[in-house]
Image (tube, rainbow, N blue to C red):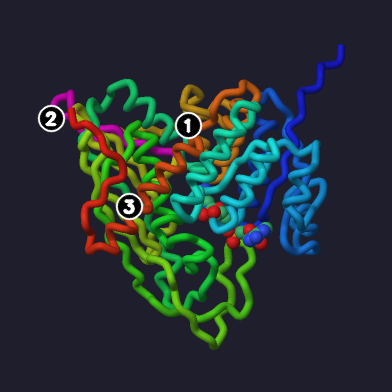
Amino acid sequence: MAERAKPRLGVAMIGHAFMGRTHSHAWRSAPRFFDLPLEPEMKVLVGRDQPRAEAAASTLGWAEVSTDWRAVLEREDVHLIDICTPGDTHAEIAEAALDAGKHVLVEKPMANSVAEAERMHAAAQRARPQGVHAMVGFTYRRVPALQLARELILEGRIGEVRQVRAQYLQDWLADDAVPLSWRLDKERAGSGALGDIGAHIVDLTYFLTGQRFAGVSGLLDTIVAERPVAEQAGAGLSNGVAGAERGPVTVDDAALVTGRLESGAPVILEASRFAWGRKNAMRIEISGSRGALCFDFEEMNVLHHYDATTSARTAGFTRILATEPDHPFVDAWWPPGHGLGYEHGFTHQIVDLVRAIAADEDPRPSFEDGLHVQRVLDAITRSSGAANQWTVVHEFERS
Ligand SMILES: NC(=O)c1ccc[n+]([C@@H]2O[C@H](COP(=O)([O-])OP(=O)(O)OC[C@H]3O[C@@H](n4cnc5c(N)ncnc54)[C@H](O)[C@@H]3O)[C@@H](O)[C@H]2O)c1
């Protein structure tokens, strides 16, 4: 007997460069490796330039292309809008999509300002009673080793969280000759290292500890204030070709932050795109009353756990290879030890999103979660502008 066809989830994706490629891969592979309740259909790829969008659609597996995202919102066969464009477009597209009754997945940071993030959150709340869902793409939440870290913290394996230290280090701007791009333009990106990579460690601290930030003190610095204008824009992941003309960098190159969680636990964060030799070193270490957890994305299948309840004579960090079938998401993939990569976090993000939509449950990180991260980024920026003054994010009662 023929199996009943699954209900379809028509998807349109806007933007087709770096994140567009990772999301396309995720939409293609999620239903092939996981049993999903809905069948995603890669309907429309939206770009600004028709020939480039057509070439990308054919490579990435989209059925049609459009250069008008507003027209796509009117299509009945499109149920979800996946936003993979720079931050200055997120609020306008997400609000319009939610008001048109479409589910939204938006890349991080959710917006370029708190005001925009508040509008997006309000739109998500307006749409929610119609069964419409919204999610922010903080993809590192879906790395198996980091999901395992969350589980261990919830199980009490490190006791009460006492301190968090996190870094997100890259080096692609350390060379002064790298030309300007939208990521160095405040109008388009909102901020620099802070929103681009610092947003991830703010969200991860929140995700792993389950605690919001109470306050921060921040120091933002623009290390190289002027760079060549790109003569030829970078395609995909390249930085572009530098021309003779020069222009200003209007965002931070590095962000240094001290903060406190709602429990009062101190946090230290660093985001930099000037850390030579560090390619995508997203690291987090959480010290609790009974032990610690430590992760570095450059070794993304590994979680280190220190159990302080064992004898000091033999105690030490245990290296857990998070590739066992009972580790989160892993049973859909390869045998133990064969390892997952950067792209799998994006696939898992689609798996969780599609399952939440089908069950009419709220996917996380929600727009409320994204708004919290935006408030933290904003507080860091204001603090830096006020000589690192302590800046409250939320008022919490201290126990
Ligand atoms: N989750 C992650 O780890 C992660 C990693 C990198 C980037 N991002 C985020 O993803 C988003 C996109 O970044 P990216 O690295 O893919 O950038 P990118 O420059 O590689 O790609 C941006 C794409 O958006 C298109 N675009 C720009 N403005 C547009 C508009 N007005 N209408 C339609 N298309 C438009 C560009 O043509 C390009 O296809 C940003 O918000 C960024 O912060 C997230």
Residue 313's mark?
2
> Which residue has dot 3 on it?
379
Locate the N terminus and report the quarter of the image it occupies. top right
> Which residue has dot 1 on it?
323
Image spot of residue 6 (x, y percent): 77, 23
Does the image show residue 119? Answer: yes
How far is disc 3 from disc 2 in space, using C-alphas? 44 Å
Give the mark, 1 or 3, whose residue is nearer the N terminus: 1
Residue type beneath disc 2: Arg
At a point 43% along the width and 62% down the height, the residue shown is: 192
Prevalent SS, magenta region: loop
Image spot of residue 101 (x, y percent): 69, 36
Give the mark, 3 or 2, whose residue is nearer the N terminus: 2
Residue 238 higher or lower than 68, as above or below: below
Callout 3: helix, strand or loop? helix
In the displayed orientation, state which residue is furthest to the top.
1
Callout 2: few (<14), some (14-19), or many (20+) C-alpha neighbours within 10 Å? few
Q: Determine whether the beta carbon of the residue marked 1 sits less than 8 angstroms from the nearest atom of ligand 1.
A: no
Q: Please name whichever residue, 76 or 162, is drawn nearer the observer in this view of the structure.
A: 76
Q: Which residues are magenta?
A: 301-317
Does the image show residue 298? Answer: no
Question: Mark 1, mark 3: which one is toward the viewer?
Answer: 3
